Amino acid sequence: MTIVLLEDEAIASRRLAELLTRLLPDARILISLPSVQEATNWFATNPAPDLLFSDIELLDGNVFALFDRVQVSCPVIFTTAYDQFLLRAFQGNGIAYLLKPFTEQQVRQALDKYTLLRTSHPPAAPTLTDTVLNQLRDALRPAQVSYRQRFAVKLRQGIHLLDTNDITYLQADEGVIFAFDAKGQKYPLNGSLNELEEQLDPARFFRINRSELIHIRYIDRLESYFNDRLAVWVAGRTEPLIVSTARTPDLRRWIEG
């Protein structure tokens, strides 16, 4: 069996790949793609895999844009953190899904559903028709919340537009909030850390302690630290950020999806 993953978070992609390797030792994971554009290019130039695992939100937008651009003929198992509105749409169309954070047993059940559909005579695997895709899009809309996309930062040279996707972490320093990018450049922001936390997408940004918020895309690795805490290595830093004891359990759950 060949499998393709569509997942924009490296840690989540590695975890899913590890689960699939344990559950399907003979399967071959061809590639993990983080964006709609990369997925479009890949499906346009390669045969379809036997199975696709796909997150809903990728780096450059909603995965349904992929299905508008190219035909994806293989069965799809969606992974999503969205609520029951979208899940009901999945159930109504016989599409397998995994609600994040998911367990190994839930992955096994989704694979069992795929196997059952594959072995049906005649094949009963659901297809992502325009009708089905429109139903899923409609179900997704109530769950969407508008979060801050960019900051207009005043610098000596003028006003710099800082995209939230380029922020590795935010840090409060003596009452001033700074956003950092992957090069280590820092940008002063207006507002308190609490106010900025409410404006940023909680699926991508996490408050690790009283003074710091991190972006999941730029986490290089996690290490154990004193008193059951975690040290988080973030792109652009030579020293780790330290997660508070109170936030460590929540961070572990957040990292898993």
Image (cartoon, rainbow, N blue to C red):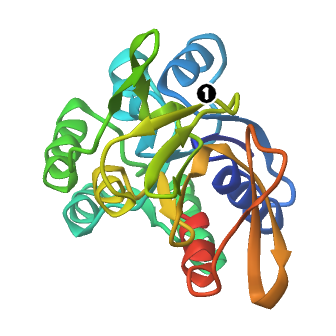
Is residue 129 left or right of 100 when viewed as pictured? left
- Image location of residue 7, percent across then percent down: 58, 43
Give the residue furthest to the bottom: 227
**Above-or-below relation of 16 to 218:** below
**Above-or-below relation of 222 to 52:** below
**In the foreground, 233 or 2:** 233
- Image location of residue 168, percent across then percent down: 59, 42
- Image location of residue 13, percent across then percent down: 67, 50
Going 78% across and 90% down the picture, which residue do you hit?
227
- Image location of residue 70, percent across then percent down: 43, 17
What is the tally of numbered marks visible in this picture?
1
**Above-or-below relation of 176 to 44:** below
**SS class of the residue under badge 1?**
loop
Amino acid type shown at disc 1: Ala
Residue that mark 1 sits on: 48
Going 45% across and 49% down the picture, which residue do you hit?
177
Where is residue 188, by image quadrant?
A: top left
